[in-house]
Image (cartoon, rainbow, N blue to C red):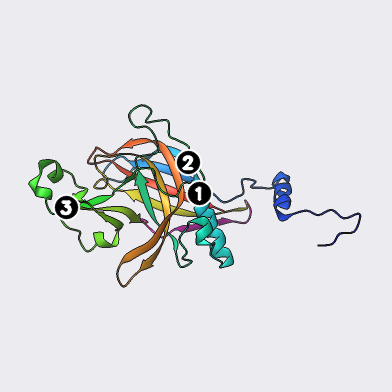
């Protein structure tokens, strides 16, 4: 680019910074997220808001957004990321590594941009053919003898353990993500409703959650190339109760 003597070069990044300083109806722009965690308090589905937190769109998630926008995958050698532009944000996972459960369960660690997985993933359900041979397993509703046809379309990304059991670490969304769009307030985001039912992850203490990108193969009913898109940590929630459930409203802003 060639400039006259009275011209000044300004990059697009600098332009964005200037725009941020201009007052407008909605100034909290940027690719970001917000999470609201509700506890289901009775059999009628009444809820109480337990926590509200900002989440981090990790570097991998932001890179994926640019890959999709430009239809141009990043060099996997340089990034270490999987290459697959046919993926979408379609799954979520939970974990127990968002805080020190023993010493500071209500002081969650801050996620960092380089996170590529949950710190301590927790399975939603475990398939174990020996469930009724053990009293503790028998009493745990998140341990099942065999997956039903419906469950096979809810839980994914299994890991087979040495004892022959299979743990499932990803779950589909409760409903399709919803558009929230307002030209007046300059606000646009996708609202994703996630549910942790009373028969999932029982016996665990959880304090982290992440959205995942993956590609679905409807013929074989499997998700492939799963990677972390975003991560949020929160005050530890005990899932020892056999009645407690969590409803999570996850918002991804642009």
Q: Are marks 1 and 2 in contact (CB under 8 Å)?
A: yes
The secondary element bearing badge 1 is classed as loop
Q: Which residue is mark 2?
A: 111
Q: How many other residues sit within 10 Å of disc 2, few (<14), some (14-19) or many (≥20)?
A: some
Q: How many other residues sit within 10 Å of disc 3, few (<14), some (14-19) or many (≥20)?
A: some
On the image, which quarter does residue 146 sit in? bottom left
Query: How far is mark 1 from mark 3, CA to CA?
Result: 34 Å
Across and down, in percent, residue 14 comes to 73, 50
Looking at the image, residue 79 sits to the left or right of residue 144; the answer is right
Q: Is residue 180 visible?
A: no
Looking at the image, residue 110 sits to the left or right of residue 28; the answer is left
Q: Which residue is mark 3?
A: 128
Sequence-wise first label, 3 or 2: 2
Q: Residue at x 22, y 41 (%)?
A: 242
Q: Residue at x 35, y 46 (%)?
A: 94
Across and down, in percent, residue 187 comes to 59, 52
Q: What's the magenta bit mostly, secondary-structure-wise?
A: loop
Q: Residue furthest bottom?
A: 219
Which stretch did the figure color magenta? 173-185
On the image, which quarter does residue 198 sit in? top left
The secondary element bearing badge 2 is classed as loop
Query: How far is mark 3 from mark 2, CA to CA?
Result: 33 Å
The secondary element bearing badge 3 is classed as loop
């Amino acid at each position: 680019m060639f400039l006259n003597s009275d011209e000044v070069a300004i990059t697009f990044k600098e332009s964005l910074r200037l725009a941020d300083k201009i007052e407008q109806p909605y100034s909290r722009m940027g690719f970001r997220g917000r999470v609201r965690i509700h506890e289901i308090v009775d059999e009628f589905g009444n809820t109480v808001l337990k926590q509200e937190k900002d989440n981090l769109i990790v570097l991998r998630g932001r890179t994926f957004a640019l890959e999709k926008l430009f239809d141009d995958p990043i060099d996997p050698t340089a990034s270490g990321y999987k290459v697959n532009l046919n993926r979408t944000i379609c799954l979520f996972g939970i974990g127990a590594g968002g805080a020190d459960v023993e010493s500071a369960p209500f002081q969650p660690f801050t996620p960092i941009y380089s996170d590529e997985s949950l710190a301590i993933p927790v399975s939603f359900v475990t398939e174990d053919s020996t469930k009724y041979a053990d009293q503790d397993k028998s009493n745990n509703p998140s341990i099942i003898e065999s997956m039903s046809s419906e469950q096979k379309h809810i839980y994914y990304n299994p890991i087979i353990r040495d004892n022959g059991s299979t743990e499932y670490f990803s779950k589909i969304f409760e409903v399709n993500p919803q558009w929230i769009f307002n030209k007046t307030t300059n606000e646009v985001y996708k609202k994703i409703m996630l549910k942790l039912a009373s028969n999932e992850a029982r016996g665990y203490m959880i304090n982290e959650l992440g959205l995942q990108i993956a590609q679905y193969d409807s013929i074989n009913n499997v998700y492939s190339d799963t990677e972390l898109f975003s991560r949020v940590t929160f005050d530890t929630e005990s899932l020892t109760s056999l009645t407690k459930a969590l409803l999570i409203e996850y918002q991804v802003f642009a």
